[in-house]
Image (tube, rainbow, N blue to C red):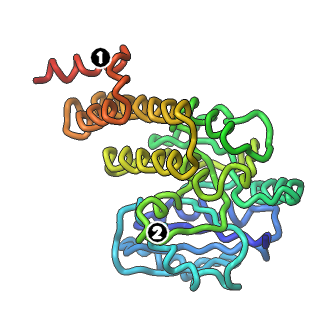
Amino acid sequence: MSKNIQIIIPACNERDMLERTLRSIREQTYDKDRIHTVVVDFGSTDGTCEWLLSHEGYHVGVYKKAEQVQRGSMIAEIAMLSPYLWPEGYGGFYTVLYPGEVLYSNALEICMREYEEHCEENPVIVLCEADIEERDGSVHRQENMFAQSRMLMAGFDTWEYTCRGYHHQIITLSPFLFAKERRDGAEMNEQRWWNKCSMLCGQHNTLYISARIGRVKRIQYEDEVEELLLRWESVIAQIRGRKLDETFKDQSMDNLARYALWRSSELYEKRGSDRAAEDCFLLSSLISPDIVEQEQYQNIQKLFDRME
C-alpha cells in the first residue's frame, strides 16, 4: 500500500481551533511530500474558508460545502467527495482529525515505521493509542488496549475488547471511507471505536500501535439513543457476519447493555429524568434481558421510579 497519508479535517465555525491542528501537521517529522491535508468547510459563517484560503500551508486543500450538517454525518458526506480530494488518485491512508485535535510531532513517522516492520503480515488498518481531551480542556491518559504493538488476532482480540467496554478512543489510519448511503458503514468513518474498525476487514489485517500518537476530543454523540442503536446494529452485524459462538454473543450484548446503563446514569446526573436517559435505560434490558438482575440496573430503576 502507498505510504501517502491524507488527513481530513471537517469543520464548521471552528476557525480558532484549526490553527492548532494544522500546526501539529506542519511539525510532523514524516516526509511532508507524502502528507496531504484537506479541510472541508461545512457552511461556516465565521470566515473559516476565507482564512484557510489565505493560510500558508504545505499541501493543504480546502473544499467548501454550502450547507451545515451534523458532525456525525460529516465524514460520510466527505466520502462522496473523496475521488476529488485525493490529488494523486486513490492510494494510501486516510485519517480524521477534528479542529483542535493534534498529532504529536513524530506520530506519522511512528505509524509508517511500524507499518514497514509488519508489512509482510499485510496490515490494512492501523489503530493507534491517543490521549483524550475533555470538553473542559483537561487531558487524560487512557490505559492502553494492549501493552505492545502487534498484529491483532481475529476472535481473541475482539473478545478482549468487548470485556473492556466501549469507552476507549483511538486514532485510525485506513484506506476506507464510506458514503452516507450505508448507515452502518458511514458511522465507521470516525473509526474511533474499535468494534466498528474490526468490522471493516477483520483483526488479522489490523496493526495495533501502543504508542500515543496524538490527542483527540472526547466523542459526544448528538443523539445518545441513536448512538446505542448503531452500536447494537454493529454488534449484531459482527455476530451474524462471522458466525461467532454463543459465548461471544452473550458477552458482547451484556457489555453493550452495561454501556447503555452507563449512558443512562450519565445523562441522569446531567439532566435528571429526561427522555434520552430513560430510553437508554430501557434499551439496556432489550439488548440483554439478564441485565435486570444487576445491582446497577436496579439502582437506576429506583431513581426513575422516584421521579414518577
Picture quarter with the C terminus: top left
Image location of residue 304, percent across then percent down:
19, 23
Mark 2 vs 1, N-terminal side: 2
Residue situated in front as seen by the camera: 48 or 210 = 210
Residue in the image at 84% along x and 56% along y: 121
- Amino acid beneath label 1: Gln
Q: Quadrant of residue 60?
A: bottom right
Residue at mark 1 = 298
Q: Describe the element under mark 1 as helix, strand or loop.
A: helix
Q: Is residue 297 left or right of residue 137?
A: left
Image location of residue 42, percent across then percent down:
41, 73
Q: Is residue 139 left or right of residue 75?
A: right
Residue situated in front as seen by the camera: 297 or 307 = 297
Mark on residue 76?
2
- Amino acid beneath label 2: Ala
Residue in the image at 51% along x and 73% along y: 79
Q: Is residue 63 left or right of residue 26?
A: left
Residue in the image at 72% along x and 52% along y: 206
Mark 2 or mark 1, whichever is nearer to me:
1
Image location of residue 132, percent across then percent down:
57, 42
Real-space Cα separation, disc 2 to disc 1, in angstroms: 39 Å
Q: Is residue 87 left or right of residue 99?
A: right
Residue in the image at 58% along x and 62% along y: 96
Residue situated in front as seen by the camera: 24 or 214 = 214
Which residue in the rendered view is the most extreme toward the left?
308
Residue situated in front as seen by the camera: 201 or 145 = 201
Picture quarter with the N terminus: bottom right
Q: Is 57 located above or below residue 237 in the figure?
A: below
Dot 1, crowdedness within 10 Å: few (<14), some or many (≥20)?
A: few
Image location of residue 301, percent across then percent down:
24, 21
Q: Is 57 located above or below residue 282 in the figure?
A: below
